Amino acid sequence: MQTREHLSPLRAKKDFAEWASLFSGKIFVKIAAYVDESGRYDKTGQLTGAGQIVVSGWVDWVENWTTFCGQWQSILNKNDAPYFHFAEWAYASYILRSGKEPSSSFSKNPYRKWPLEKLDAFLYELAAVAGGGQKIFVGGFISTRDFSEAKKHPAFSRFAPASDPYQACLNQFFLSFSNEVQQQWQYWKEPVSFFFDKNDDAEWNHAILDAFGAAQKKDARIAELSFVNGKIPPHLPLQAADMICGRNRQLAANFTDPKILMNPSKLDDLLIKPSYLRATLAWKMSVRAEHFSMLSLRHGNYPWRNKNQP
């Protein structure tokens, strides 16, 4: 039985279309910056969940996002879910799978009473929508712990290209955005509007604005930047960005740990694989080159890892 008032899929589409008309961009980029509370305030990367800073999202045309909103809202309604949030979903899944006692904050988790089967089905159905269509995936990450330690070792300064790991990640993201989209859409000329999840971290928001401003000077198509609440319509696409960003943080953590085997999951097959399969050869080649260039993060023989890791 549904226990809350639902927004109809048609209304979700209409609300998004009306809101989108306020912006000049014909392409919308929904960006989620996935850093948990400890991660955002631990730039050394030592605390649990702070080892990587990831910025990831989806690029698509406005009219496609309008269709997306109806599909996404329909799945939320079917499951009586107020929204999708990867961190809350992942914690609810962890509690059920581990059998451990949840924290006191779990009482506010919208998925706290769901059985495991419903949790998984909900995730996979949303993932198929997030990964479907013609969206382009964009993103990047910094190994926060390696960044922090590299600053102490001049021989490894290439791993710390800025004074701040979060600023470095944002700079990396915005400066590579134009190249990545151009590889996918060769004749792209339209302006782009970027949307980040609204938060109260003034330092983080300032870093976003700085990186955006630097990129805008290099590419006039980078038109607008806004902070919005991704948990409510008309900003449902930000929930899809949160999903890809949350999964990418997990993958980044696995990538930098040579003891973990990198095996694709069902979530990856639904969320990431379709985007890769429909990508251009130029993009695939650049991603492959980038992957090889970062293998040292997985297998490097660094003094700080020798000291702190068995």
Image (tube, helix red, strand yellow):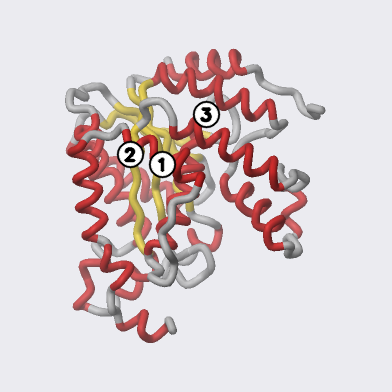
How far apart are labels 2 and 1 at the CA level? 7 Å
- Percent across and percent down for residue 118 are 69, 40
Q: Amino acid at mark 2?
A: Tyr
Residue depicted at x 39% and y 40%? 273
Q: Secondary structure at mark 1?
A: loop
Q: Secondary structure at mark 3?
A: loop
Residue depicted at x 42% and y 64%? 261
**150 vs 57, nearest the viewer:** 57
Tell us which disc is closer to us: 3 or 2. 2
Q: Amino acid at mark 1?
A: Ile
User: In the displayed structure, does residue 93 sit left or right of residue 17?
Assistant: right
Q: Is residue 181 above or below residue 85?
A: above
**28 vs 225, nearest the viewer:** 28
Q: Earlier in the sequence, mark 1 or mark 3?
A: 3
Disc 1: which residue:
272
Disc 2: which residue:
276
Disc 3: which residue:
235
CB of mark 2 within 8 Å of CB of mark 1? Answer: yes
